[in-house]
Image (cartoon, rainbow, N blue to C red):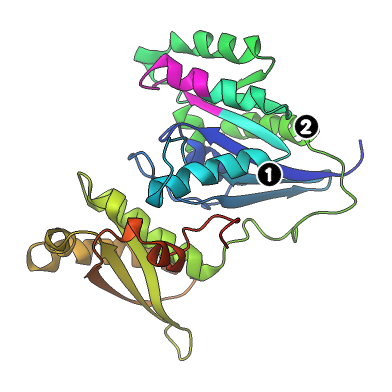
Amino acid sequence: MGYKAGFIGLIGQPNAGKSTLMNFLVDEKVSIVSSKPQTTRRRILGIWSTDQGQAIFVDAPGIIKADKGLNGFLAQEAEDVIASSDVLMAVVSVDEEKPEDAEKVIEMVSKSGKPWVGVITKTDIVEKAHRLMILKRMIEDKGGKALSISVAALKKDKEAQEDREAMLIEILDLLPESPAPLYDIDLFTNENVREMVTEIIREKCFESLHHEIPYSLAVRILKFDEEGPLPKIYAEIIVSKENHKAIVIGKEASAIKKIGMEARKEIEKLMDEKIFLDLKVACKPEWFENKRMMKELGYVTKSED
């Protein structure tokens, strides 16, 4: 077998476990993860390189139907990932709300005409175990190969590494031949530090805040000063309603302090050094319907860029 390289699009419903799966396959924290759906807002690349080839996983936003604003961007991102990938992974979970949600993903991927596999996630949820065979049959009936992964495996249990390697070999085999790697083999993502810092802060907002607030929230870096002994990062958390500011800040600034502390710890791990992090909260009414703001925050499709 010659050297192979290409893009693998992870396609699934919101909260199917795509981001966790990609982090597991790349063996690095690339995509942010939370228990809330629609955490992923734009495509994120995770890169796995070996002597035999290079697999570039593309974590797409969950499939939704919309044609404007932020939701329109999310829908377009998922469609673009399907169109531009060499191989597709239909990611379906045993705890999908409705069987038709899984069917929709499998149908969409199989209809693309591209090589694909189905990955069934969260297979160790005991009360949903009967769904594993149903999903497996759905995938195989559409001509795909069904792979499965448990929640425990995604936490990188030692025994899971064999399953991970088997899955990677399966995927690599589907990729097109390439004269060389598409990215530097030492990279595990093409994201820059600034982009990763923005996503880490947003992840901590998702973890700390409840109800609809995380979905109408965005983060932008105001200043990234790496001069001096201590890098200084100034960031702004943008909310869409004035009354959300008080919730994000919290009583006696408890919420914003918690978000800042958790984000700072993870950013320090990423940068491998101590940092200073300053978070502010600003209200930009209905920012997710404003094209200029959307572009400024990086929510712009390739066709609009």
Q: Tell me if residue 94 is in the magenta stretch.
A: yes
* Viewer can see residue 166: yes
> Image quarter for residue 256?
bottom left
On the picture, is 60 further left or further right than 68? right
Mark 2 and mark 1 residues within 8 Å of each other at the beta carbon: no
> Image quarter for residue 159?
top right
On the picture, is 179 further left or further right than 296? right
The residue under the point 78% across, 37% down is: 175
Residues in magenta, as a range: 91-104
Residue 239 in picture, x, y percent from top left: 25, 61
Residue 130, placed above or below residue 42: above
The residue under the point 66% across, 51% down is: 47
For mark 1, give the secondary structure.
helix
Residue 236 in picture, x, y percent from top left: 31, 71
Residue at image mark 1: 84
For mark 2, give the secondary structure.
helix
Amino acid type at image mark 2: Leu
Q: Residue furthest bottom?
A: 228
On the picture, is 201 further left or further right than 212? right
